[in-house]
Amino acid sequence: MEAAAARPLQVAAIGVCAETGFWDSLRRLKLDVLGTDDSPIPITGYYTPRQYEKIASLFRICPESILPPSANSFGDRNNCPVPGTLLNTNNMRGFQNLDRALILRAEAKKILHDISSGNVEENPSLLLRFLVISFADLKNWKVYYNVAFPSLVFDSKITLLSLKFASSALSQEEVTSLSKAFIEWRKSSETTVVPFFLINITQDSTATVRHLKDWKACQGNGQKLLFGFYDHGNRGFPGWALRNYIAFVSLRCKIEKVQFFCYREKRGHPDLQQSLIGEASFLAPHGWDAPDYVPEAIGWEGETIGKEYKEMKPKEIDLSSINPASQDEEKQLMHLKLMGWRHFAVNLDKLSSARCLLLGAGTLGCEVARLLMTWGVRKLTVVDNGCVSMSDLVKQSLYTDKDCGVPRVTAIVPHLKERCSAVEVEGIQMEIPILGHNISASNAASVLDDCKRLQTLVDSNDVVFLLNETRESMWLPTLLCADKNKIAIAALLKYDSYLVMRHGAGPGIKGGGMDEVIAQIENLSTEDALGRQRLGCCFCSDIASLVNSEYTGTLDQHSTVISPGLTSVASGKAVELFARMLHHPDEIHAPGDIAGTDTEHQLGLLPHQMQGSLSKCVLSTVLCNSSSNCIACSNAVLSEYRRRGFYFVMQAINCPTHLKELTNISDLKKPFACSKISASIPVNLEKLSSARCLLLGAGTLGCDVARILMTTISLTMVEHTFQDCGVRKITIVDSGRVVVSNLARQSLYTSDDRDSPKASAILGHLKERCPSVIAEGIKMEIPMPGHPVSPNEAASVLEECKRLQELVASHDAIFLLTDTRESRWLPTLLCANENKIAITAALGYDSYLVMRHGAGPGTSRGNPDGDAAADKLSAEDALGRQRLGCYFCNDVVAPVDSVSNRTLDQQCTVTRPGLASIASGRAADLFTRLLHHPDGIHAQGEIAGTNSEGPLGLLPHQIRGSLSQYNLLTLLGYSSSNCTACSNAVLSEYQRRGMDFVMQVINEPTYLEDLTGITDLMKSAAYSQVEWIDEADDDEIDML
Ligand SMILES: [Zn+2]
Ligand SMILES: [Zn+2]
């Protein structure tokens, strides 16, 4: 090969191989460590001068590339390390908007600085510094990226004067000597990773390879000096690295002509047949030595001269093919890892290894088991003695019609597995011995067996959930947990109120050199092992009802007759309490917090007991210490149990008066009487079953709300019979499909539904729980403001708007359960226009909002003719009352595209497991109350504590609750005249222009703000004085 004449230097671009393993490492790093941090990450790339037949060697970015530089950057002869920078953005929009030209120049400036400061002589690989920009779409297991090798651009062209293969440019002696020198250079671990070097050839043809920093010493004396480098180029083209090398030569050596050597290797040996020797000349660039100079640069892979960087197509990597076995589990745990991004780091190891024993596989058992899985619990044992009956189906969330007649513990196992294949679950069918049930001679042996079996189960588990339907059956497990110092969490339901509590730790041992066995019996301390006062158990504070062993059974009967959604609320709280306790450094010994106090703990407060009522909209945290009269956890009982074991247990079960005597409570007066609950609740079964409900969203909230609506069994207690009743006409709209990460969280779906549209998958699951339900599913995207549509999409978006309009018109109540703010806008507008009940449920990270929208406006009097009516919307509703507000009334900005700029954890609406259950329970409950109110949608908003409750309890306008703060607020807000969804300005515009108006809102993000005067409001000084209800929570909820 002979260079014909001087010509511009052309170099070969670098071929990059970014291995899937690298991206998988990034995925883990992002998820587990980085979170929302998107600052640049130092990485290392590798290349080699080794050439394959006709193929240039690739620049490798591999799993090790992402390790901290100290751990891996040393490399070896086939992996010459090169420093790089990774910029991983938090979202696609951030990736697209990166100023590629600017970033490239910034990197080039670093190279320039390294040259002029002398860093390159110490670490020559800095000349090949590279840059990776990416967006790791963890949700979809994809990565989008571009790679650049920034290269300084000279003012004028570099001229290639000659270019030859080394074997023909050098004499035979020189080739021999040089090959030897290269073998030495490549053999030493210190030099083999140095990609830029000098070749010195003396007049007697002796060649040496030397470090770049020796360039001054090598000049003159008639010696030949070549600037050599490991070349990744191919055939007749030098590699890309030559460009910055020439910049180095120009700037540091101040010369305008260079001889270079492109070193290539074949099968581990210097290949001087393929290596190139060339000569290039160039003019010294201007201004490079000025300190603030930012050089021009090129170097994006696939860069096309003259095209905008924005048109550059990102490369795409699909990560779903790696680790398919563990991928399902990783997807299911992702939401927990995402919690660590902003909130607190979930201890997944602790959760997955915690062995949880659930006593009861009924209403509470089903919910708690499923929610525990969403917290990452993987070891469950479920104990129950009953079988699934037809009437259980709507209430006990996991069972379907096929399970009828099957023992619950058998039926529950596959239902948990099909939601989470990694869960280990064992079902044990057994009766839990019940206090006060006479033991006959014939069943004594089996009762004793059950006692022993329960003891073994408590011993072998870490946490016990008391979800039994009767309190008498909680006695033995409570005693066993106190004895073994096991975490016990109890949930009790009573008509429409619940109690969720954790039992205190068992007693510690008093000091003293007693024999151990005796000490354990006789010297029980009144404090726990940490010297703290023990917290009470569920028998401590409610002595009366149990002392009275002719227990009236009020609780029993009511425990199955519960307000809609109560189970969901209580289960959500129980599981939350468990997770909090597990993360508390003192675990079972953690003192009980009271709401309203400060806590240092990231998880928020850790109360001892929570009591709440749905009808009163109250939630209180209660703290009570272990009572010395307690029949289950007092030292008197525990030492008796330790002394006499199961003889004592059997005696107590058979004859509870024994417990009375033991605990000296026979003289105690009944501290309070169980409050009587009115025997007939005026529930209108007809109204419920004929109400047509439209659910927008079939995700976590949608599943729960649909199921709870069917369960609405606030039943007539007349003659102690109850009858299943609930909503039977449900239409569900959703555009998504079931994916594996939905399974445990979205209560209805199972692994068989994967990839099916949610709108159709959900129908079967509703039917198999309630055959009489008439459910319809509609796969449809809800049109959203601020999401401009292209002309060819316009027709279908218009169709969807009309479809939604028809759906709203043909239903009685609309539930807004979607997960973006903007998707609630059109339904809100349509509901206000049609005067339909609209109920919104929205989740923050640990807070929720459940609200009903106000009625639409009435028309002003004195405008009898229809045309004018549209313009004369009244400020009041049809009953002449001030209209209540909607979801958007408090907002100061119009809903626009809020997703693109979000980080992954925001896109996934990371919420604490259990929160959706609580919000869904409240939403369904609010609906039931509203439906029964004589004024319906016009009912005024009530505030908790104001004594305004009707027979169905309080009917608030908005309920806001926070899991970590344990507060529950009822709020009241009126429709705002600036509201972007329900104000008269918006409604009359809609009535005038119909879907034209809607389409304009969709396409023009600022149009709504102009129309409603929000723009002016924001501009005016008065804005700062506008007070929004409950500002503290707004941030969290507005993100939705
Ligand atoms: Zn107790
Ligand atoms: Zn509004």
Image: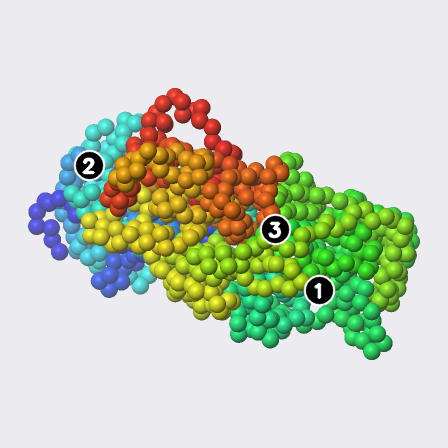
Q: Which residue is mark 1?
A: 460
Are circles 1 and 2 on residues that touch, CB within 8 Å?
no
Q: Position of residue 592 (x, y in %)?
A: 70, 43
Q: Residues within 10 Å of mark 1 (few under 14, many from 20)?
A: few
Q: Would you identify the image quadrant in which residue 76 lies?
A: bottom left
Q: Position of residue 354 (x, y in %)?
A: 63, 59
Assign the C terminus to one quadrant of the image.
top left
Q: Which residue is mark 2?
A: 154
Amino acid at pointer 1 = Ser
Task: Report the front residue among 901 and 562.
Answer: 562
Q: Position of residue 777 (x, y in %)?
A: 39, 62
Amino acid at pointer 2 = Phe
Residue 993 appears left or right of 542: left
Q: Nearer the viewer, mark 1 or mark 3?
A: 3
Q: Would you identify the image quadrant in which residue 1015 lies?
A: top left
Q: Which residue is mark 3?
A: 573
Assign the N terminus to one quadrant of the image.
bottom left
Instruction: Report the residue at 62% width, 63% height from top.
Output: 722
Instruction: Report the residue at 26% width, 46% height from top.
Output: 995
